[in-house]
Amino acid sequence: MQIGHPLRCERPITTRALVSTILFVVILLNFVGAEAAVLKRKNIDDLTVPELEAYEHAIQILMDRSAKDPYDKTGYTWQAWVHNCPFIWRPRNPTSSRFNGQNCDRIWRRPGPGYDESHPGVCEHGKDLFLPWHRAQFYYFEKLLQSTDPDGTETDSRGKTGPSTKEVTVPYWNWTTAPSGDRYPKALERADSPLNHDRRIKGPLTLFEQIMLAQVTNPLAIAEKIYNADWQRFGGYRQEDSVGGYGDFEDIHHNPMHAEYFGLDMRSPSTAALDPGFFQFHAYIDLLYEFWLQEHGPNAVTSKTHFLRADQPDSVAPPPGHVRGAGLPSMGQVEIYFDTAKLGYEYEVQPKDRLPTRNDVLRALAGPAGTPVRFGETGRSAFARLTGNGLFNPASGPATMIDTVDVEIPNSVGGRNSIVVKLSRGHGPDLSYLADVYLYPTSTTFDPASKDIRDRYVVRSGGYWGRGGAMSHGGAGTPSKPYVADISSSVGDLIATGHVGEEWQVTVVISGHPPTPGFVTVSVEIN
């Protein structure tokens, strides 16, 4: 072959061959286009300057739309309401409407003529829909961002024109690593950025917060849950299950981050998404969901045909396989949100964002002999080794509440039998709180200030994320759902090591940023 010679056809090209060639090229271009449509979600600290500017530009345009019409479904406020505004009066003529700031309506009576009942959305928490629902929410939010200014010609309220938003994705914040800013990623703390937010806790973590939140952000503890194939333990229990509620991830990691790390607007589901940092925080949670699916597949995920409630704009094309369902508006069923490529995105994961390995987890759980520790046999329980010895810090002052109940170690546990600590409250404000659960023999005097006692006997530590207003999640006037801590694994160790029939005690320590509930009923149930 000689370089520089023109291409010569040895024989004429037939019409059929020409058509076949054209079809092949069209198919190839469509394939390449489909591949190109799968965009990368990156760590927000890894965005290039143009990528961050495009994301900020898209967020600002959504906020600008809401400033003109808060009931615009393509605006930021409506998208924040999707997270937990189950009911609102939507005016037919927004320019002449009564508007209660960014707050979801708290009244059931129609405010006047010209208003229609509307249901922006109900975020799913304390059940197995938690992770799929938020993935669906982000699908629509991300498509809206991409459509705000695809040509890069729109000028937002900051006076910035462009850049193009057609390839914008929601970046994640890996909150298991040290933040690039004082408390959050630098991009969330810049004063002139639409990602900054007045109603979140500011400033570096205090020493007390560092000690407490090190347990919440511990990547080893999160990795252990990712490698566990038990979907209910990771993702949550079905709503109709008699025992359950939160999965371990939501309870131990997600809830305290909302209430204690971000605080203020993020402390309540009804206002959480008003903080733009909500989207970086939850994008990382979606990445963890993806890690679990890659590890175990979707077969074990429950409630696959359940519809995910939210009223999204018609301008966004739903994902493949979407059906509307009956009743209130929905984003489709759980099963259409497993494959991120079909949703138009995948994650870029750098080495710093990878989780510890299985072997790392096994080493952390090994006792002196190299075998997994059994509860009560060593100076540190498995929970203390992976996570910590409790979220309450005795040096910060007295706990909100400490309560103790007796429990007899049963003959068996596991399978359909479980032993749980249930924390119940009646009607009234549904407030967030932290709960540490300790299990110890009656011969032991429990002292919340004793590190040795806490290390040895802690079996659970997590948070209840209060719904705030009475109408949130479950409707007006509904009592808060009990917080349930499954301690079956620890009790199973006691059964295996000869403690059947013995009297032990469970102590629950309630704490957290005020306001926290002044009373909680503690019970131990064997099911």
Image (spheres, rainbow, N blue to C red):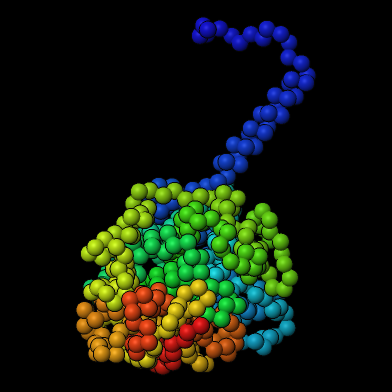
Asked if 424 appears above or below 461 in the picture, the reply is below
Query: Can residue 336 be seen from the camera position used here?
Result: yes
Residue extending farthest to the front is 498
**Residue at the extreme right of the image, as rendered:** 15
Tell me: 259 left or right of 103. left
Give the x, y percent position of residue 205.
28, 70
Let me know if residue 179 appears in the view.
no
Q: Identify which residue is drawn at 57% across, 49% down.
A: 341
Q: In the visual, does 462 lie left or right of 54? A: left
Query: Which of the 4 image quadrants contains residue 9?
Result: top right
User: Closest to the observer: 491 or 473?
Assistant: 491
Quarter of the figure with residue 337: bottom right
The vertical placement of 156 against 205, above or below, is: above
The residue drawn where x is 36% and y is 72% is 261
Image quadrant where residue 241 sits: bottom right
Residue at x-position 50% and y-position 73%: 415
Vertically, is 226 above or below 434? above
Give the camera-side residue of 292 and 177. Answer: 292
Q: How many marks?
A: 0
